[in-house]
Amino acid sequence: MDVDSVNKIPRNASIVFHVSAIITLSVFSLYRIGIGDYKHAGFFSLAITPLLFSLLREWQYKANVLQKQITLIMVSIAICYSCLYLGYKGLIYLFPTIFIYFFLFNIKQALLLSILYALFGLGFALNIESTPVIARYSIAIIDCIVFGALFSHIINKQKNALFYLAHTDELTGIYNRKRLKPSLNNAIESKIKHQTKTSLLLLDLDHFKQINDTHGHITGIVCYVR
């Protein structure tokens, strides 16, 4: 397992995200149908389509980050559209989706995209909402972006620290067997695919067990590294 694998959203959590978004948009569409607003109901029904496709890919273990990113952007476009005609009723949905950007993109990309997303949503909402209302929502949305960035930064630091502890020998600081295995697999694949020269050095110290038995394993490790 590498850092990229650690940073991926767990499959079960991703499925919950998809199902929650689909239910939310479905309820919203049904409400619009109930009040006779078929135009917006149809638009939000179309927005459910990429979510269903993405959920199916996730369910079949075929999902990838790019597909999820595109799906999130498409849903964000639908929400911005709702802000244009529904005002604050559409702005409400900016809050949960902003946090998802920090799960699917690195922190710099998430900051840029979430800020653009917020600017478009707030700007479109000005079509029917007063400036004071937009100002109040702006403050809350800015808080969401800041908190999302902080949480993302903290979680990434914790993930990297856990990855280091899991793949590094505490005493010597060198990679352990868990970290060595993917490196060996990559070297073998590169050898087969590109015919690159590959070498593996093995050290076998005679009577090394006697050092461990006599002086302890910690002394043995230090002697081995030196």
Image (cartoon, helix red, strand yellow):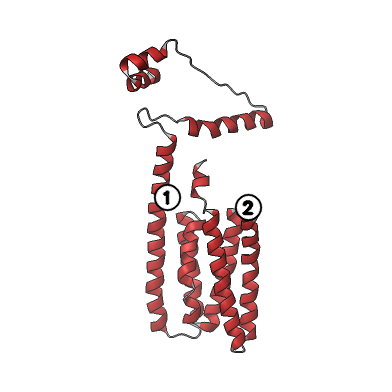
Residue furthest out toward the bottom: 36
Residue 77 marker: none
Q: x, y (%) of residue 175?
A: 45, 31
Helix, strand or loop for disc 1: helix
Q: Residue at x 42, y 29 (%)?
A: 174
Q: Residue furthest top?
A: 206
Q: Amino acid at mark 1?
A: Asn
Residue 217 location, x and y as percent?
35, 21
Question: In the depicted view, which residue is nearer to us: 44 or 205?
Answer: 205
Q: Amino acid at mark 2?
A: Tyr
Q: Name the spot of residue 24 as percent of width and height, x first.
A: 54, 73
Element at badge 2?
Answer: loop
Within-10-Å neighbours for mark 1: few <14, some 14–19, many 20+: some
Left or right for 22, reference 213? right
Q: Name the quadrant of the C terminus.
A: top left
For residue 17, side relative to residue 132 (left or right) = right
Q: Nearer the viewer, mark 2 or mark 1?
A: 2
In this orientation, which residue lies closer to the viewer: 151 or 31? Answer: 31
Q: Residue at x 46, y 63 (%)?
A: 99
Q: Residues within 10 Å of mark 2 (few under 14, many from 20)?
A: few
Say if 187 sits above or below 165 in the image: above
Q: Quadrant of residue 223?
A: top left
Residue depicted at x 44% and y 35%: 167
Q: Can you give x and y, in whole percent of width and height, for residue 170 in the image?
A: 36, 32
Q: Which residue is mark 2?
A: 61
Residue lying at 46% horizontally and 81% vertically, measured from the top left: 88
Mark found first going from the N terminus, 2 or 1: 2
Image quadrant assignment for residue 95: bottom left
Residue 156 badge: 1
